[in-house]
Amino acid sequence: MKRDVAVLGVGQTKFGSHPDKTLPELFAEAFFEAFDSSNIELKDIEAIYFGNFVGEITDGAANLGGFIADEIGLRGIPAYRFEGACASSSVAFREAYLAVKHGIYDCVLVGGAEKLYSAGTPIGTRALATALDSAYEVNSGLTFPGVFALIARMYAKVYDIPLEKLREKIAHVSVKNHKYGAMNPKAQFYNKFGDLKVEDVLNSRMICSPLTLFDCCPMTDGASAVIIATADFAKDRVDEPIYVRGAGQASAGSLFRQKWDIVKALPRKMSAEMAYKEAGMSPKDIDVAFIHDCFTIAEVIASEAMGFFEYGKGADAVEEGLTWADGEIPINPDGGLIGKGHPVGATGTAQIYSAVKLLRGELDFVKVDAETAITDTLGGDFGTLVNIILSVHRR
Amino acid sequence: MFKDFFSALMEGKLIGVKCKDCGEITCPPKSTCNSCGSRNLERIELSGKGKIVSYTVTYVAPLGYDAEVPYVVAMVELDEGAWIVGRLDVDAEKADKEDMIGKRVEVYGKEFPTEQFYPDKQRRVVPMFKIVE
Ligand SMILES: [Zn+2]
């Protein structure tokens, strides 16, 4: 018994700094927005799928499923916490989707929360590094910017682009995503860096060479929430259900064990192909993409692995404007992780928040006409990859 | 298992496993072959020589590593085919100015203080890469 699945309401807190709130309190804010736009009753929600990466380290908080349920008035129902690094809430979303699709539940709540900004940069950087190989990568002091710095140099070599030239090309990702982030009232950098120039990116503080501060997404506190149900349940309650057409997921281990596959982000290709296959679609059917731009180079290699550009052409594409809001395939018109912020465990369902809003024509600060969207969330150094395809069309 | 790898490294030996089914060499050793997933493995000693595939100079370190910045993290392709992560025994300034990719290196082990989240609570051993040409 397979059922069609749709999104009802979505919610997202302002991204940035929330030192005054616990993780459950922060999540409650996102949940209330999602619930209030779903036209359902509390008792309709049968289970909670919650994503969080490092609550233990940032807030001394684990076992969060129950605390989340309790905070929002749903004490008693099954509540799970999912951890897949930066993809935590996308993993939660896919599991929730599969449960509804296969008849386990009719209506569930998905979301995530994280507080990395409040943790401070040294603890935040160490916490993020737990997503790397703990024995064989972290011991050298490898960090997340470090991983993508390694990848940037490999990309330059493999495609024979001088490193300085590549730095300029990928800087356009930061310029683009900061432009849209500055327009997004819920973004960490709302009204900031909207006029960023390529030179600003190149000349900002070096974090892990060749990547500078503006090549990186920020540390962020935030939460997001999505309510999903069977399509039949959803269409009776909301005017514009957004249908979940496909979901893919793939895995990998240590970065160094992936060798040259790193540059092609192979697990992402596997995950995206799984999602396209389920949806009966190809990259050509996608109108807009919300891609995991934790770093500028990350968006570029993702845009290739997901099939929007040939391998080695992604950096040219952003420089030529093909991924801007008015381009061939708009990528991250909500600001992405770089402009909007990256509250790790909340990022996946925040991408879904933006995608759903955009497909309903409610993302009013940027103009993109779209009927079908894809999200892309990366956990670790390709350890966990999730892609979700959403559409206004049920079939 | 991971402690054996680092103990050997401190004695000047780089150890790994060779797959008796497909011939792939996995280093650092894991429970299965990196190529085919087989458990039919034998322990071997590698040459410790290879070339730099990529590297980065780290200026912002995680908690527990701050005293060591700037440091150069590198990924090396060993002559036997396996890739490993370690630190390049080169000045940060030099690494940022010159292209280090492709340079031949030799690996050795160096001990650093451990930190609260590192799985070895006694010490933290880092594979160091010395440029040999
Ligand atoms: Zn094998």
Image (cartoon, grey):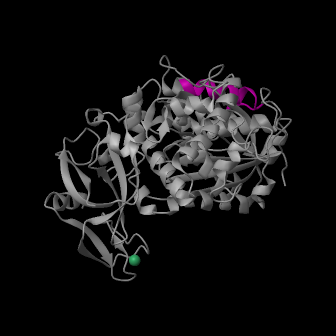
In the rendered image, the residue lying farthest to the left is: B11
Q: Looking at the image, in which quadrant does ligand 1 appear?
A: bottom left
The majority secondary structure of the magenta stretch comes to helix
- Of residue A69 and residue A124, the one placed in the foreground of this image is A124
User: At 43% from the left edge and 56% from the top edge, which residue is drawn?
Assistant: A255
Q: Is residue A27 magenta?
A: yes
- Camera-side residue: B1 or A228? B1
Q: Is residue A336 left or right of residue B95?
A: right
Figure quadrant of residue A54: top left
| Residue A387 screen position, x and y as percent | 64, 51
The span picked out in magenta is: A26-42
In front: A102, or A29? A29
x, y percent for residue B96? 39, 43
The answer to whether residue B16 is above or below residue A47 is below
> Relative to A268, does residue A333 appear above or below in the rendering?
above
Q: Is residue A73 left or right of residue A236?
A: left
Q: Residue at x 53, y 23 (%)?
A: A25
Residue closer to the observer: A287 or B40: A287
Side of A277 where A152 appears, left or right: left
- Magenta segment includes A176: no
